[in-house]
Amino acid sequence: SELDYSNLTSVHNGEDAMTLFPKIKDMSPEEQKQARAALLAYCRLDTLAMVRIWEKLIELVKGYKHKHTEKKIETYGSTFCETISLCW
């Protein structure tokens, strides 16, 4: 999947990133390089996840503006939750 955090090398979530970041100052230059690459890969994927959520919200809002019904609202809620679950 496009948003698969398990494919990342060492930083798979925000907690991993927060743990690694302050340790960089005490690393060798090579370790710093690897840590920086891992953090950037995680941030890139996290940003992509936010973009996908944003795109879905735009799609939902456009549909909502055209047909304002209870059924649409229910559909949007479940679709939005499915989209969110793909990101975590």
Image (tube, rainbow, N blue to C red):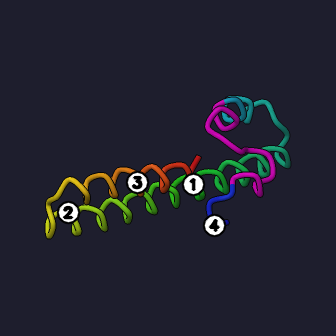
Question: Would residue 69 appear left or right of 15 to someone viewing this image?
Answer: left
Q: Which residue is mark 3?
A: 80
In the rendered structure, which disc, 2 or 4, sits on the residue that comes first in sequence? 4
Q: Secondary structure at mark 2?
A: helix
In the rendered structure, which disc, 1 or 4, sits on the residue that comes first in sequence? 4
Spatial CA distance of label 3 from label 4 is 17 Å
Q: Which residue is mark 2?
A: 64
Point 73% across, 44% down: residue: 11
Residue type at mark 3 is Phe
Spatial CA distance of label 3 from label 1 is 10 Å
Q: Residues within 10 Å of mark 3 (few under 14, many from 20)?
A: some
Quarter of the N terminus within the rendering? bottom right
Residue type at mark 2 is Tyr
Point 31% across, 52% down: residue: 74
Q: Which residue is mark 4?
A: 2
Q: Which residue is mark 1?
A: 86
Point 70% across, 29% down: residue: 19
The quadrant in which residue 13 appears is top right
Q: Which numbered tag is attached to residue 38? A: none
Mark closer to the observer (2, 4): 2
Contact (CB < 8 A) between labels 1 and 4?
A: no
